[in-house]
Image (tube, rainbow, N blue to C red):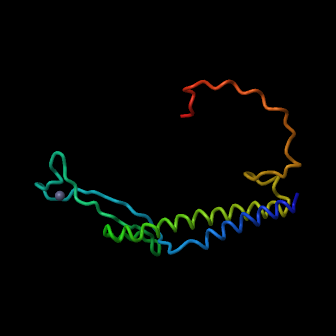
Amino acid sequence: MPAADDHSAAQARAAIQAALGQIGFTLPGSITIRRTRCGKPRCACKADPPALHGPYIQWTRTVNGKTVTRTLTQAQYQTYASWLANARRLRTLAAELEALSVREMARAEGWAKITPGTQAPPRTRPVRGPNPPRPPETPGDQPA
Ligand SMILES: [Zn+2]
């Protein structure tokens, strides 16, 4: 029923928008934590076992098409890691809102049954018989 679909789509949109409203600062890029060897031949980083340098906390992002890296202190990392997590959350929510919008457009325009990857309205689903009985599950049969 279109009215029910409108309602659920509006509810889903409101939930995404509420989540978007909760996001604070968002930092682009990603964090890489490296431990490295240096060029000095008799350094402890060449010992067995090696005592590597670092950890170096590197924040990498793209600025005007170029990769930019800045090394952060542990304190900076602790302060700003949540900002990076917020950016990932923002991207996830934006993707959800886009997918919802595409579904809603297809539903409104009657495209659902010809758009791959979207669910057709119930009335166009093929009528299926009852599911065949499932084989009994044996202990140890776990998906890989
Ligand atoms: Zn070294």
Query: Percent position (x, y) of residue 132?
Result: 78, 28
Q: How many labels does the image show?
A: 0
Which of 56 and 7 lies nearest the eye of the viewer? 7
Query: Percent position (x, y) of residue 126?
Result: 86, 41
Examine the image and state in which quarter residue 55 appears. bottom left
Q: Locate residue 59 relative to residue 19 in the image: left or right.
A: left
Q: Locate residue 93 relative to residue 8 in the image: left or right.
A: left
Q: Locate residue 102 relative to residue 46 in the image: left or right.
A: right
At horizontal 85% and vertical 33% (from top left) the residue drawn is 129
Task: List the single residue furthest toward the left.
Answer: 42
Which of 66 and 45 lies nearest the eye of the viewer? 45
Query: Percent position (x, y) of residue 123?
Result: 89, 49
Which of 64 and 18 lies nearest the eye of the viewer? 18
Q: Locate residue 66 relative to residue 118 in the image: left or right.
A: left
At horizontal 75% and vertical 53% (from top left) the residue drawn is 118
Q: In which quarter of the image is the N terminus?
A: bottom right
At horizontal 57% and vertical 65% (from top left) the residue drawn is 91
Q: Write down which quadrant ligand 1 falls in.
A: bottom left
At horizontal 62% and vertical 68% (from top left) the residue drawn is 19
- In the displayed structure, 69 sits above or below 131; it is below
Examine the image and state in which quarter residue 5 appears. bottom right
Examine the image and state in which quarter residue 30 appears. bottom left
Query: Percent position (x, y) of residue 21?
Result: 61, 73
